[in-house]
Image: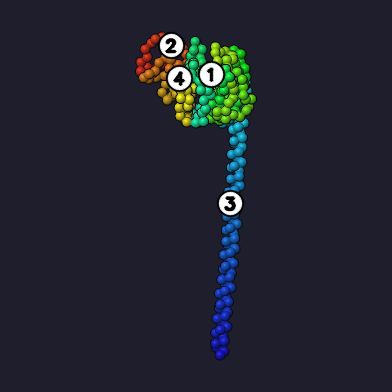
Amino acid sequence: MSLIRNAKLLLTIVIAAVTIAGKAQSSDQMHQQMHQQMLADQVNIHKEVNLLDSVTMLYRLQEEELLFPALDLYESWNNDWVNPYRGQNVKLPDSLKIDVSDYFPPTLGHVTSNFGWRRRRMHNGIDLKVQTGDTIYAAFSGKIRVRKFERRGYGYYLVVRHNNGLETVYGHLSKFLVKQDDVVKAGQPIALGGNTGRSTGSHLHFETRLMGQVINPNDIIDFNNKVAHTDTYLFQSKKSRAVANGTIGPGGIAYHRVKSGDSLSRISKIYGVSVSQLCKLNKITPTTTLQIGQRLRYN
């Protein structure tokens, strides 16, 4: 009996030891799991904090975009001139992709006068037919930078700086519907058409510019169909166009290489020089027949 009792006692001791060890192991596992959960919670907290920081930064960027559209391109905001870099030597980007997908026609009127040289003066925009009192709309979303009157020029006019980097000019207006520094959306009414300033009839003078540089609106917009040609417009500076043609000569003199379909008038519009200046630089006449592959100096 003593032997059986001792065996039972030994078995009891073994079972107790195994149970205690199991509980100890279970306690260690629980502690480890709790520690891992705390680390995971810390990671989640950091992620949430980072997300909040990102959202806050996004809101700040959106606020800056509203206050100063295209801030990465323009160094200043002034309400004085159509060209904000007037009198300055500004460095334009060689090329820039511009989102024009939200384009809205400023008016449904047809083109009455196109971009280019006109009676020995450069016409920096296009004229669109409107009647006095017709509504004029913002072409893209942005902010009203200039609201002024110019008796011998634009008459009552607006300049809007857009989020995509472009600026648009609306001239010969009869009434403003917005104030300076107002934020506007594409398609929002901003003015009424008119016949003020240097104008011979009621129409809208419309310009597109980048950092003061005039761009032919026809390069961006199909005015017959009232849409942008593509969702993205590729701006290229005169220098980059010349480099692409391999036409920068010694001393920075720039040349255009004549292609099929080129004319003096077309070349003058591309580089913003008059036909008479092209003729003078190249010692030719307006009636000279251009040859494919011929180089024409334009600066």
Query: In the rendered structure, are the residues bearing label 4 and label 2 in contact, judged by CB atoms less than 8 Å apart?
Result: no
Residue drawn at the location 59% of the way across and 59% of the way down: 35
- Kind of residue sitting beneath label 3: Asn
**Alpha carbon separation for disc pair 3 and 2:** 71 Å
Image location of residue 14, percent across then percent down: 55, 78
Q: Amino acid at mark 4?
A: Ile
Q: Could you tell me residue 78's position as x and y percent?
A: 62, 24
Between marks 4 and 2, how big is the CA–CA gap? Answer: 15 Å
Which comes before the other along the chain, label 3 or label 1? 3
Q: Which residue is mark 1?
A: 130
Q: Residue at x 61, y 13 (%)?
A: 151
Location of residue 174 (image quadrant): top right
Mark 4 vs 3, N-terminal side:
3
Q: Answer whether residue 90 is visible to the viewer in this image.
A: no
Residue closest to the eye, 177 or 207: 177
Residue in the image at 59% along x and 21% along y:
192
Q: What SS does tag 4 mark?
A: helix
- Classify mark 4: residues with Cα within 10 Å, few (<14), some (14-19) or many (20+): some
- In the image, residue 173 lies at what x, y percent? 59, 18
- Residue 270's disc number: 4
Q: Which mark identifies residue 44?
A: 3
Q: Nearer the viewer, mark 3 or mark 1?
A: 1
For residue 279, the mark is 2
Q: Is residue 200 visible?
A: yes
Q: Position of residue 253 (x, y in %)?
A: 45, 18
Q: Residue 247 — which label?
A: none
Q: Earlier in the sequence, mark 1 or mark 4?
A: 1
Q: CA distance from mark 4 to mark 3?
A: 57 Å
Looking at this rendering, what residue extends furthest in the bottom direction?
A: 1
The amino acid pointed to by label 1 is: Val
Q: For the residue carrying disc 3, how many other residues have a C-alpha within 10 Å: few (<14), some (14-19), or many (20+)?
A: few
